[in-house]
Image (cartoon, helix red, strand yellow):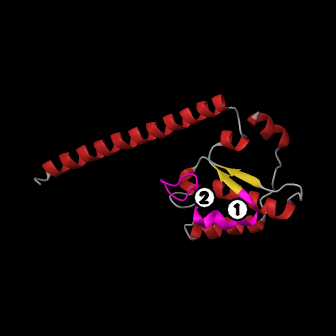
Amino acid sequence: MIDDIIKSKSQIIAISEKTKDKVIEFGINKKAPFKSKNSTADAVIFFSAIEYLENNSDPDVTDSIFISYNSNDFSRSKNEQDIIHPDLEEFLVRTNTKFERNIAKALKLSASMQEGIDSYLNYKAESALEDDYIDAQIDGYIQHQSDIKRGK
């Protein structure tokens, strides 16, 4: 279903100078989605979609959905992942666009499909936490060994 939507119902949007300028402005000012890394591609997608909605909205369409599981760039915080970052909120309000991290919720898929997607996303999140914990343990051990060598 998702592949069908992407392949047959998508609109290719040209990247305007206005969008490029907005991406550069947000990048220079370290605003979302540039909070932690270079997120030029994410910013281009977001601002191009917003510009498209501002200029081409169908009067019969009452709202839109921006879907991204990338909570590092688009969410308010790690504890508020389902809420858009304040730097980007005005753009969603202006275009009557909802923010959703889970495409299944956005498309209102069946409960069993939703559970499968949620299970996978939780697994990925837990795996990332485990990786972070292991990395922290290794870094701590290396620091401890370095301190021993220096006689601390």
The residue sitting at the front extreme is: 111
Which residue lies at the image location 17% right of the left edge and 51% below the top edge? 147
Q: Nearer the viewer, residue 78 or 135?
A: 78
Please rate how many residues cluster around mark 2, counting C-alpha atoms within 10 Å: few if below 14, some from 14 to 19, many from 20. Answer: many
Magenta span contains residue 90: yes
CB under 8 Å between callouts 2 and 1? yes
Residue type indicated by callout 1: Leu
Residue type indicated by callout 2: Ile
Measured from the top left, where is residue 82 in percent x and y? 58, 52
Q: In the rendered view of the protein, which quadrant contains the C terminus?
A: bottom left
Please rate how many residues cluster around mark 1, counting C-alpha atoms within 10 Å: few if below 14, some from 14 to 19, many from 20. Answer: some
Q: Quadrant of residue 61?
A: bottom right
The residue sitting at the left extreme is: 151
Which residue lies at the image location 77% right of the left edge and 67% below the top edge? 17
Q: Quadrant of residue 111?
A: top right
Q: In the rendered view of the protein, which quadrant contains the N terminus?
A: top right
Q: Is residue 141 left or right of residue 88?
A: left
Of the image marks 2 and 1, the number of the one nearer the N terminus: 2
Distance (Cα) linking label 2 and label 1: 9 Å
Measured from the top left, where is residue 47 in percent x and y? 71, 61
Q: Is residue 98 left or right of residue 123?
A: right
* Residue on which disc 2 sits: 84
The image shows residue 144, relative to residue 123, as above or below, that is below
Which residues are drawn in magenta? 74-97
The image shows residue 113, relative to residue 38, as above or below, that is above
* Residue on which disc 1 sits: 92
Which residue lies at the image location 57% right of the left edge and 66% below the top edge? 31
The image shows residue 66, relative to residue 117, as above or below, that is below
Q: Is residue 144 left or right of residue 19?
A: left
Which residue lies at the image location 57% right of the left edge and 36% below the top edge? 118
